[in-house]
Amino acid sequence: MKRILDFLGVLGVLGVLGCTSKVENPSKVDALPEIYPDYIGVTIPVDIAPLNFNFADETIDAMDVVVRGSKGGELHVQGNEADFDVDDWHQLTKQNQGGTITFTVSVERDGQWKQYKDFTVSVSDYPLEEWGLTYRRIKPGYEVGGDIGIYQRDLQTFDEYAILTETVVPGRCFNCHTANRTNPNRITLQMRGEGGGTMIQKDGRQTWVETKTDSTKAAGSYSYWHPEGDYVALAVNSVHQSFFTGTGQRIEVYHKFSNVEVLDTRTNELILSPLMQTDDLEIFPAFSHDGKWIYYSTSKPCRVPAEYEKVKCSLCRIGFDATTGRFGETVDTLLNGPATDKSYVLARPSYDGRWLMYCMSSRGNFPVSQDDADLWLMDLQTGESRELKEVNSGQSESFHNWNGNSRWFVFSSKREDGVYTKLYLASIDGQGRVSKPFLLPQRHPRKFYREMMDAYNCPDFTKTKVALDAHETYRQVFGNERKKVKIR
């Protein structure tokens, strides 16, 4: 049987080779090729999956692509799409680290070839140094539960693996999965609704915690690890949705209350501060690179949803002492939302301590539902901010995270259709210069993204593959095994 399969495989290869035609005397087109995804002029790490692409015009008969490295190496593919061998691609990118690779694209229609202007892709000196990405995939149907899943993707290949799906824990809604600065040995996961709870996994051991107490308004969510791996900052809130009719906007997501607290995962104790338990809405905490500060956003309460346009979040920080487990006694306002008539949320400090990336929009504290949400970058050495025009679009950009060496970041964007968030990656150098973002590569990109009816959210990098025992998750979730927390 194996010999038959081997023989058929050889025939398949010969068939593909037999269908190729030599590009002879093509007519030259004085324009760049229109390809999907748009990878023209992007910067990539050496360890990214192949940048496979389709020609935008689907009526062509064939596409021929030759790729040459500035430091050597060449690839050649021909067919209805550019589909590069993974190993050959990695050999080419490693050979050309710090250089460029040039693409020559020709297309055939009715026996005639046209050759377009070459385009280049830069291969960064900065490696990605991460195994993959984690993210939630969910259909944008706005209901609780449904076909929800948290997945992980090997960034060097096109392989995707489920971490936890709704089929394992039926009827449950979950999100807010967070690794400790790309290290999945410390990871959290929140589950909402009946039987909800917070999963704390440390070194492979799951513990499900009930973070709701008589002294707090709700269970924790929107989590972020302290760099030492003992504390987790949490937001305590309620999430609601309102829908628009007769306007260009579909939905407004808002919170009726929100506070910030810290969980000591060693003792299952909650650490509270009166400065973070106010009538204002404190939300989206994130520890600084050294763990000495907690960045967060805060807004004044108003009558939502009626006054949804009045929600203006300021970006603040408060001290935190990991030795004593105490908050600081003063709050610094870094960006004042009401004063600028803007809203600043989702602060994410780079792990090298240089940058603070955040979302700015005209209102609200849930930027993925705001069409004008853009990414901004603050230089923590100078306090100056600038818009990341290199990556922003006319649609929402949000849910960004850094890789371990702080030279790459991932974010979600609705730029393609205004409905489905997709994942983009970009690089940043030591001076804050940011490259053109590129869409997460797929083996057959047009087919994949056209047929994918899920939105991506909460992406994050991981150094290694996440190991989560789904059977243990089911056992603890439906066995109602919850560790009770107490207030320190």
Image: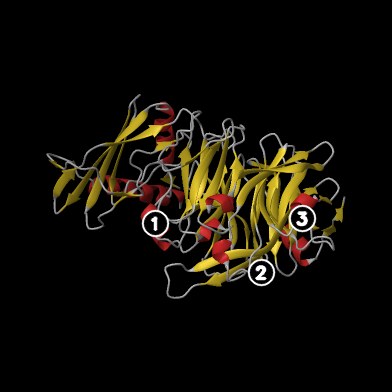
x, y percent for residue 419: 45, 63
Whether tag 2 and tag 3 are in contact, CB under 8 A, the answer is: no
Give the image's coloring scheme.
secondary structure
Left or right relative to 264: residue 406: left
Q: Nearer the viewer, mark 1 or mark 2?
A: 1
Badge 2 is on which residue? 170
Q: Residues within 10 Å of mark 3 (few under 14, many from 20)?
A: some
Q: Which residue is at the front of the view, 31 or 324?
A: 324
Q: Which of marks 3 and 1 is in front?
A: 3
Q: Distance between the residues labelled 2 and 3?
A: 34 Å
Q: Which residue is at the front of the view, 240 or 341?
A: 341
Q: Residues within 10 Å of mark 1 (few under 14, many from 20)?
A: few
x, y percent for residue 388: 46, 42
Q: Which amino acid does label 3 sit on?
A: Gln
What SS does tag 1 mark? loop
Q: Which residue sits at x=68%, y=47%?
A: 224
Badge 1 is on which residue? 416
Kindly identify which numbered label has been placed on residue 227.
none
Q: What residue type is labelled 1?
A: Glu
Kindly identify which numbered label has been placed on residue 277.
3
